[in-house]
Image (tube, rainbow, N blue to C red):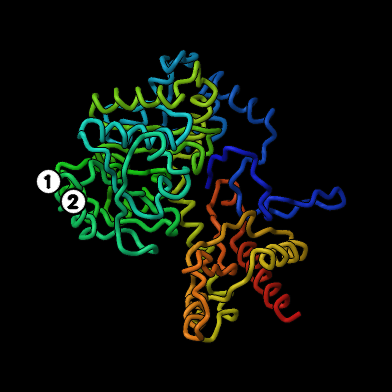
Amino acid sequence: MSSTQSTAAAPNRCDVVEDSTDKPKPLSLSQFVSSLAPQQEFERTASYAASPKHYLEKTLGPSTFSQRQHLLSLPDKIDKDIYGTGVHKTHFQQHIASLLGKEHGLFFLTGVQAQLAGVKAHCDFAGRNRVAWHGTSHLETAEEKAYQALYGLERVLLGSREDANPSVEEVRDVLALPEAQRPSVVVLEIPNRVLGCQTYSFPELEAISAACTEAGVRLHCDGARIWEIEPWYQRSAGKTFADLGRLFDSVYVSFYKGLRGVAGAALVCDDEGVMAEAKKWQRRAGGNAFTLVYEVVDCERGFNENVGTFAGKWDKMVEVVEGIKEATKGFEAGDGRPVGYTADELVAARDRAAERMGARVFERLWPKKSLDEQSEKERLALVAKGESDPQADGKAVEDDRREIVEWMIVSALLEVKTQVFVDAYVALCEELVAGAKQ
């Protein structure tokens, strides 16, 4: 998860970690940020740049390197791009495009720029600045409405539920709107991060792709986590990155999340005109820097180190989740409803559990904004008593006991025994229950 703030943000309650020299820090079971010091990261990138093949053979091991070589981006030369032009940058862009079944690729410093440049380019060619996406889209929730303020786009929300991807029929309903109201682009997030990485079956994606083609609407993929979901499409439908990419007119991918590059993204598509227009929007948004050599080199390193690892990471996550669910059954409420705790209660219980177990189950929390059933009942009860409606007064009741933890398995966590995760979560539950009794 990331968002760009225009001013310095106050520290998240969960970001502050006690620094003690008396004992080692607990093992973090939710690792998003590299534990390397900046100097170590620079040295790692420099080592890769000196000889990518040698670095990868040493880091991955000769056997793994050989097995994954068909996926890897192995440049003949690493040079310094100038305003986007460079042999190595072109090689990496083209490799990512080809892997995703596309002809053209463009590296961006941020995913916000990449995705909006692509969507806007499609709209420019269609002559309508209307786009459609689900209410959980990053474009909707985490970009300060850049689509509207900077790119002049209007958006149509897809789907009828906050907690589910729009169905094939719901997408078709939007495509059936009169041409003046119809979006030029439909954006699907594959998988949907906010919805716990829910995704579509491959036949559903085929149906949506065909419907968009028939309606003359472009289909764009927010593929920030497409690397993580590809193993599921491989196992469920025998489909590759290229098979997925070919269903979309354009795809955005991220390099700094699961791939662990320093910062960067790419936009890929088949339409040379759309890509040329996207380059213009990159320039207009200030994204065509004098050089992006460090970002490009480190993103290629991260890609090469992590592509091909996600099937194993997925298996590990399933094993961990099943173990936690089984071990924490005794903490479920009798009526099956979620048991709520505030962020402060969760953080305090996490820290007590970490003291006991030497493992820290999460680093950050994000509040879930929607009202839960209890909050709604409380609101209706106030109205029934003749009291003012908090929502009508602009003071919506917010339940502060609904928090989200984002979690992924990184390579370092593959070596952690599943029982360590299980015991740490059981300890967290024990501390939450004990805290509630005080």
The secondary element bearing badge 1 is classed as helix
The one of 374 and 306 positioned closer to us in this rendering: 374
Q: Position of residue 195 (x, y in %)?
A: 42, 59
The residue that disc 2 covers is 175
- Give the mark nearest the N terminus, 1 or 2: 2
Helix, strand or loop for disc 2: helix
State the residue at coordinates (54%, 86%).
334
Percent x, y of residue 324: 56, 69
Mark nearer the viewer, 1 or 2? 2
Q: Amino acid at mark 1?
A: Glu
The residue lying at 24 percent from left, 24 percent from top is 272
Specify whether residue 61 is in view. no
Q: Is residue 349 above or below residue 21?
A: below
Q: Are marks 1 and 2 in contact (CB under 8 Å)?
A: yes
Query: Which residue is denoted by mark 1 in the rendering?
Result: 214
**Total numbered labels placed on residues in the image:** 2
Residue 435 sits above or below residue 67 on the image: below
Q: Position of residue 306 (x, y in %)?
A: 49, 39
Packing grade of label 2 (10 A; few <14, some 14-19, many >=20) is: many
With respect to residue 204, does 35 lie above or below? above
Q: Determine whether, in the image, residue 370 is placed left or right of residue 235.
A: right
Q: Give the amino acid type for the residue marked by disc 2 in the picture.
A: Leu
